[in-house]
Image (spheres, helix red, strand yellow):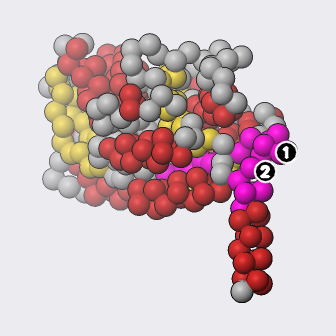
Amino acid sequence: MKKTLLLALVAMVSFASFANGQKESGKIVIGANIYSFADNFMNGVVKPELESYAKTKGVEIQIVDSEGQQAKLNDQVDVFITKGVNVLAINLVDPAAAQTIINKARAAKIPLILFNKEATEPGAMASYDKVWYVGTDSAEAGVIQGKMMVSDWKKNPAWDKNGDGTVQYVMLKGEPGHPDAEARTVESVKAFRDAGINVEQLALEADPNWSTVHGNDKMAAWLTSSFGSKIELVICNNDGMAFGAITALKAAGVKLPIYGVDALDQAITHIADGEMNGTVLNDGKNQARATVDLAVNAAMGKNVTEGTNWKVQTNGTKAVRVAYIGVTAANYMEYKK
């Protein structure tokens, strides 16, 4: 019995020491996730920047892969709380499940930074005074992409293959219900209508993984469909799907104007090679840096933007917005590494 009690006591002391280790060492620990390491942008741009920038700030960041499963993310948050991390930095799998994560953080009295995927539940952000969001204005990427396409369409009358004055397009859409995917889909096409140009959607396919494989498969199928010869424009919610579409176009020996979002390195190369017409810089590096900056300040009990250039919107969203930038053949060299 004494041995059992002793072991239990040792376990309690060990956990307490672990949970409070950062207080003793003075090191802040951020518990973070990426909704899916399969996402080119989140895993290839945001994750490494979170890691490298956290190191420059002298804090520890533990990043896990939620594998596109909200239930898995919920469990990962529970583990982080049990470990005694100082602050959570969470990339939601399902934007409609934000309240669950917020409730967990509030119950544990741990500050929470949501990033890249914004809560869609009304009142979720207002339900906890220590939750903030870092990301973009969802509509802005679509607006910028749309303006690029309208400008190029006007400059290239030959793109209107049948001369009917209407843009016949196909759309590779990202994750259904994702605020960015929904806004980009609407705003990119709306730009044509706002410019007085008629549009006709020939096909639209969504992919929860925003994947290159999806882009290739769908583009290949569309090119061999009954409307394949009518396609005049390919609009993609992200670069990853655009890469797949480019592969399918090249395999079929077809050249069409194509636009993406993210400004990944490969997209810049495709623009340089004339295989892609434009993309929109989704500034993952600054999203990651803002996330870490807010997390560190929140963990220290400071104003989350103290000592930074970030600004929290005062319209009730509690959000730091990182701006998008259009990238075309005219300025891609500025973003080439």
Q: For residue 286, what is the image quadrant?
A: top right
Above-or-below relation of 131 to 110: above
Task: Determine the residue located farthest toward the front in the rendered image.
Answer: 2
**Which residue is painted at 42% across and 44% down in the image?**
103
In front of the other: 112 or 155: 112
Q: For residue 236, what is the image quadrant?
A: top left
In front of the other: 215 or 293: 293
In front of the other: 53 or 76: 76
Above-or-below relation of 137 to 232: above
Residue contact at pointers 2 and 1, CB within 8 angstroms:
yes
Counting other residues with Cα less than 10 Å from the Cα at mark 2, is it few (<14), some (14-19), or many (20 or more)?
some
Task: Determine the residue located farthest toward the right in the rendered image.
Answer: 25
Disc 2 is placed on an element classified as helix
Magenta-highlighted residues: 15-38
Above-or-below relation of 289 to 17: above
Counting other residues with Cα less than 10 Å from the Cα at mark 1, is it few (<14), some (14-19), or many (20 or more)?
few
> Does residue 216 show up magenta in the picture?
no
The N terminus: image quadrant:
bottom right
> Does residue 33 show up magenta in the picture?
yes
**Which residue is painted at 17% across and 48% down in the image?**
227
Name the residue that disc number 1 marks: 25
As drawn, is 60 to the left or to the right of 123?
right
Q: Residue 21 carries which label?
A: 2
Q: Which amino acid does label 2 sit on?
A: Gly
Q: What residue type is labelled 1?
A: Ser
Whole-percent x, y for residue 12 in the image: 71, 65
Task: Determine the residue located farthest toward the bottom in the rendered image.
Answer: 1
The C terminus: image quadrant:
top right
Whole-number angstrom distance, CA of label 2 to CA of label 1: 6 Å
**Which residue is painted at 36% across and 34% down in the image?**
124
Residue 337 visible, this orientation: yes
